[in-house]
Image: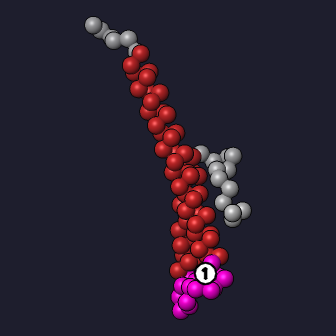
Amino acid sequence: MNDEFRGRNPDESTEQWLARSSVEYHDAWDAVRIQQRGRSPFLDDGYDGAMDRLQAADNERGNAAIALDRERRNIARAAGMQAKHRPASGK
């Protein structure tokens, strides 16, 4: 596992985690593209390292997206429960 990708930092929101991990993912893709230029990707340590970084960044971005989705669903569920238990007004 690449130590560069460790999950959400304690001081960032889930939205910030997703944004940061998306930037890291796109940076990793750029590194893969650079390694592909004019080279055969087979048996190339630079390419292998870039692909490892891309895979780790993709996993990180996926984990952040799942966490954000869960957070939003919990907020929506709580709001729905509050609305359901609110007394009807004016009737």
Query: The N terminus appears in which quarter of the rendering?
Result: bottom right
Q: Furthest residue to the left?
A: 91
The amino acid type, in three-letter code, at marker 1 is Tyr
Q: Position of residue 83 (x, y in %)?
A: 39, 21
**Eyeballing the image, is 52 above or below 82?**
below
Residue ID at (58%, 69%):
54
Frontmost residue, 36 versus 89: 36
Question: Does 90 appear in magenta?
Answer: no
Q: Which residue has dot 1 on it?
A: 47
Residue 67 spot, x, y in % from top left: 54, 45
Magenta stretch, residue numbers: 34-48
Q: Quadrant of residue 82?
A: top left
Could you say where residue 75 lies in the image, as x and y percent from the top left? Answer: 48, 33
* Farthest-out residue, top: 91
The number of callouts visible is 1
Label 1 crowding class (10 Å Cα cut-off): few <14, some 14-19, many 20+? many
- x 63%, y 48%: residue: 12
Judged from this view, the residue extending furthest toward the front is 43
